[in-house]
Image (spheres, grey):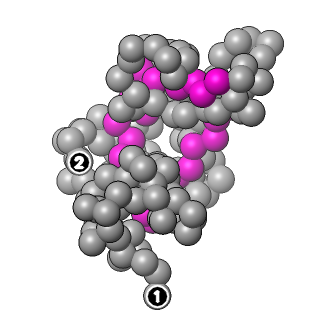
Amino acid sequence: MPFCDGLRVVKSSIHGYGVVTTRPFAKGELVCYGDGVFYPESADFDDTYALVFDGEDTGLGDTYFWDLVDQTRWFNHSCAPNAEVRGKWDPNEQRVNAHWIAVRDIAIGEEITYDYAFVGEVAEPCACGAPSCRGLIVDPDPAELAKVPAHLQRLLRRAA
């Protein structure tokens, strides 16, 4: 797997491993491309580090996962991220083109984060530490928040 220039995998203060910058990135700049393995929802596969593409995204009719296999698999979630992932199915190449873009200036040594925005049914406790932390890794859409399991509702912090 190719290494992403300007990034280094480290022990994270957010969760497990993370990826920090070894050079600054400007707002709007490409942080890196991600590589992965594409597989259908029906496959016996661990989707922990995967991006999700529904049938409308791919034109293939089913939900598919793009399991990240490079440093991007250690990009952690933040409710106030410094990057966003953009992924698109390329029908000609039969693969996903995924890349991360800086949504603000990112300093040397800062951990790269993006908002995982999980659907409500699979929300998880969040440890991002951002002042705007939702308390859960979940899409902030009210329809998704309504689907958060009852045992996790107490962790949810809603915007004032």
Q: In terms of depth relative to the viewer, which is nearer, 23 or 153?
A: 153
Q: In terms of depth relative to the viewer, which is nearer, 120 or 84?
A: 120
Q: Amino acid at mark 2?
A: His
Q: Position of residue 32 (x, y in %)?
A: 54, 34
Using the rendered image of the protein, determine whether residue 137 is visible from the camera's viewpoint. Answer: no
Query: Going by the image, does 88 lie left or right of 141?
Result: right
Q: Residue at x 52, y 34 (%)?
A: 51
Q: Quadrant of residue 132?
A: bottom left
Dot 1 or dot 2, earlier in sequence: 2
Question: Tag on residue 160?
Answer: 1
Q: Residue at x 32, y 68 (%)?
A: 153
Does the magenta portion include 71?
yes
Q: Which residues are magenta?
A: 62-88
Q: Position of residue 39 (x, y in %)?
A: 53, 16
User: Crowding at label 2, few (<14), some or many (≥20) Cα neighbours within 10 Å?
Assistant: some
Q: Nearer the viewer, mark 1 or mark 2?
A: 1
Q: Secondary structure at mark 1?
A: loop
Q: Position of residue 18 (x, y in %)?
A: 30, 42
Question: Tag on residue 15?
Answer: 2
In this rendering, the answer to whether 67 lies above or below 81 is above
Does the magenta portion include 101?
no
Q: Position of residue 113 (x, y in %)?
A: 42, 51
Q: Amino acid at mark 1?
A: Ala
C-alpha distance separating marks 1 and 2: 27 Å
Query: Going by the image, does 6 lie left or right of 9?
Result: right
